[in-house]
Image (cartoon, helix red, strand yellow):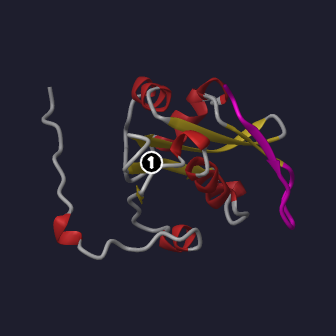
Amino acid sequence: MAVSKIITGLFQKKILYENSPDKINFKLAHSWLKETYWCKGISLEKVEKGFRESTTVVSAHSGNRMVGIARCVSDTTRFGYIADVYVEESARGKGIARAMVRNLISQSSLRDVEHWYLFTKDAHGVYRDIGFRTYDKPERLMHLAATKK
């Protein structure tokens, strides 16, 4: 079931936030994400599969134009991982990324999540305003990259 909200901000057009992967323009999302530092060169198929298989997603729309996307992967109890937060360059600085993350973490299916995680290279301020902090014990974090097939 899609959940829609209209949020109006100061100096901001009405932005419609949709929580259905069916509302995502995957070709546009792919054109954005394939140029990012975190998934450079990703295929359209992986972008679509990633969003469709996520616990929840959000897309931001200004009129008929999609201007942002984000998604969450979670076990719905202990952890939620926010990923692929992207706002079209012309729509940045208007609170859309923050609104999308707030939308994700406020979903009723995720109300029991105890810990939220995300990775960022350059948007710490965006997430700090929501309550995220740098992890106090980074030595506990580990990473395993899949081997190429």
Against 20, residue 16 (above or below) is below
Residue 2 belongs to magenta span: yes
Mark 1, residue position: 83
Q: Is residue 65 left or right of residue 86?
A: right
Q: Quadrant of the C terminus?
A: top left
Q: Quadrant of the N terminus?
A: top right
Judge by depth and name the residue closer to the eye, 108 or 41: 108
Against 110, residue 129 (above or below) is below
Residue 68: x, y in percent?
Answer: 64, 46
| SS label for mark 1 | strand
Q: Name the residue located 54 percent from the left edge and 48 percent from the top edge.
A: 111
Residue 46: x, y in percent?
Answer: 39, 28
Q: Quadrant of residue 67?
A: top right
Against 88, residue 3 (above or below) is above
Residue 51: x, y in percent?
Answer: 49, 32
Q: Is residue 30 left or right of residue 149?
A: right
Residue 61: x, y in percent?
Answer: 75, 41
Against 119, residue 34 (above or below) is above
**Badge 1: how crowded within 10 Å, few (<14), some, or many (20+)?**
many
Q: Name the residue located 21 percent from the left edge and 62 percent from the top edge.
A: 141
Q: Is residue 41 left or right of residue 33?
A: left
Label tally: 1
Task: Give the dominant element type of the magenta stretch: helix, strand or loop.
Answer: loop
Q: Which residues are magenta?
A: 1-14
Judge by depth and name the residue closer to the eye, 27 or 7: 7
Q: Name the residue located 63 percent from the left edge and 51 percent from the top edge.
A: 100
Residue 143 belongs to magenta span: no
Q: Amino acid at mark 1?
A: Ala
Q: Name the residue located 71 percent from the left edge and 56 percent from the top edge.
A: 91
